Image (spheres, rainbow, N blue to C red):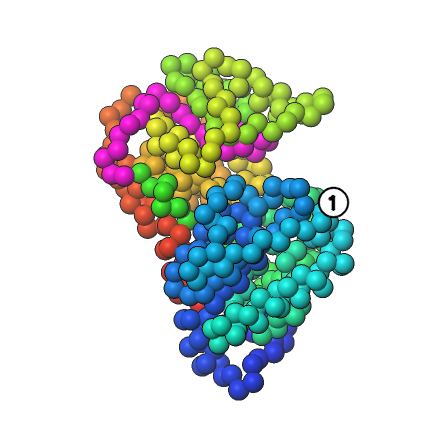
């Protein structure tokens, strides 16, 4: 049952706590800032059992709605999509101007959902900047869906982010965190720790490899993701130099170099120039699965000490798991939660030895099928069911 925490909450006339609990089974949802595929995936799965309204927002001229998957931005059945294109600064320096406008928009959407379903929606807010938009919806239970440590995005705004996040945490009935490290952080901040839940990323059905599909480039190691400072490029070069018979594919955008280049960028240039390291560049969402499925090994060579890596739940955990292929990672906290399926190596010598053993061994069908089965138990429809159970 959803109950109030901290701030006083207005209730609809005549509603009892029992009524509120009973109505959660059909309560509609309003998702704010559906700017990433995984937030939209959760919203769309919930829409299979109830009415869901999802809002994507971005500044004019920007591509801030994440990888564009056209079918995600379409209304269908009980899923209603809205896209708010706003002037730059609407959530930052001009937020005081735009917050009342956006609060009124949120208010109109919640009232429309109330009229069509008879229930106030549960509002899902993934970002601290959403908090001022909730000013006119005191009747609606709120879920803070934490995707990251947002203070790291723009360090000069960390105090403002902390202020907004504190208010959002205070207001929210439930706090869902992708990463366990974030769960631990928020549980230190609240008195009722049962409000905070680990809610890791799911996997989209199209990423799950069919059983028996064995089209694999055995002597290949694949990394999928942006090529930025979160990758330990010195470690990459050391491992690749010890495995000259393997090909290391890096699939994703190469972030531009600064002038002069930072130390990590120089290390990246060195790593990508090695003869057995291939920078594939950006590929479409539809082609990502082909790369993870073909890999002899899927790799996450992240800097284990990088603040982003400590606070995140890499999308690649479940996406790689769905391929069935072996997975090698550094000791990123969220990866360490799956020791049965993900090998952890921080030392280049140990990692190279593990890779030599892995590519030289026959395919372990039990492990391959085990990873696929694990992914099938962690799809977004399962996450939607878990959220229903939490409520």
Percent position (x, y) of residue 281?
Answer: 51, 26
Magenta run includes residue 342: no
Q: Which residues are magenta?
A: 210-232
> Residue 56's spot in the image, x, y percent?
57, 52
The residue under label 1 is 156
Q: Residue at x 36, y 50 (%)?
A: 378
Q: Does the magenta run of residues contain 226?
A: yes
Q: Is residue 83 left or right of residue 80?
A: right
The residue located at (37%, 50%) in the rendering is 379
Residue nearest the viewer, comparing 305 with 236: 236
Where residue 190 appears, x then y in whole percent?
A: 58, 64
User: Mark 1 Cα within 10 Å, few/some/many (few <14, many 20+)?
Assistant: few
Q: Secondary structure at mark 1?
A: helix
Residue 319 vs 185, above or below: the answer is: above
Residue 178 locus on image (x, y percent): 49, 51
In the picture, which quadrant includes the C terminus?
Answer: bottom left
The quadrant holding residue 308 is: top right
Principal secondary structure, stretch drawn in magenta: loop
| Horizontal relation, residue 359 to residue 281: left or right | left
Q: In the rendered image of this protein, does residue 164 appear above or below residue 67? A: below
Tell me what residue is drawn at x 42 percent, y 65 percent. Answer: 50
Judge whether residue 268 can be spotted in this image.
yes
Can see residue 359?
no
């Amino acid at each position: 049952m959803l109950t109030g925490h901290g701030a006083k909450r207005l209730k609809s006339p005549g509603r009892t706590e029992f009524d509120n609990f009973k109505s959660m089974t059909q309560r509609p949802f309003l998702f704010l800032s559906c700017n990433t595929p995984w937030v939209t995936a959760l919203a769309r799965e919930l829409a299979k059992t109830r009415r869901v309204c999802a809002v994507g927002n971005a500044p004019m001229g920007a591509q801030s709605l994440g990888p564009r998957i056209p079918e995600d931005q379409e209304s269908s059945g009980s899923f209603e999509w809205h896209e708010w294109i706003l002037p730059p600064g609407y959530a930052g320096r001009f937020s005081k101007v735009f917050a009342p406008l956006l609060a009124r928009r949120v208010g109109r959407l919640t009232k429309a959902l109330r009229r069509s379903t008879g229930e106030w929606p549960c509002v899902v807010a993934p970002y601290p900047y959403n908090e001022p938009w909730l000013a006119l919806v005191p009747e609606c239970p709120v879920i803070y869906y934490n995707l990251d440590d947002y203070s790291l995005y723009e360090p000069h705004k960390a105090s403002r982010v902390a202020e907004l996040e504190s208010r959002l945490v205070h207001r929210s009935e439930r706090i869902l965190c992708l990463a366990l490290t974030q769960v631990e952080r928020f549980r230190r901040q609240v008195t009722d720790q049962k409000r905070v839940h680990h809610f890791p990323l799911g996997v989209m059905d199209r990423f799950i490899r069919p059983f028996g599909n064995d089209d694999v480039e055995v002597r290949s190691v694949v990394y999928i993701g942006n090529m930025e400072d979160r990758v330990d490029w010195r470690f990459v070069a050391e491992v690749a130099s010890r495995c000259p018979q393997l090909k290391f594919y890096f699939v994703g955008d190469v972030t531009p170099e600064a002038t002069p280049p930072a130390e990590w960028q120089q290390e990246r240039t060195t790593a990508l120039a090695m003869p057995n390291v291939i920078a594939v560049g950006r590929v479409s969402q539809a082609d990502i699965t082909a790369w993870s499925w073909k890999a002899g090994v899927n790799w996450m060579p992240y800097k284990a000490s990088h603040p982003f890596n400590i606070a995140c739940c890499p999308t690649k955990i479940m996406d790689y798991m769905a391929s069935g292929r072996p997975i090698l990672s550094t000791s990123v906290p969220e990866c360490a939660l799956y020791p049965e399926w993900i090998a952890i190596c921080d030392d280049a010598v140990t990692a190279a030895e593990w890779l030599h053993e892995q590519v030289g061994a026959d395919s372990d069908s039990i492990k391959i099928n085990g990873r696929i089965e694990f992914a099938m138990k962690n799809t977004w429809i399962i996450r939607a069911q878990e959220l229903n159970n939490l409520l």
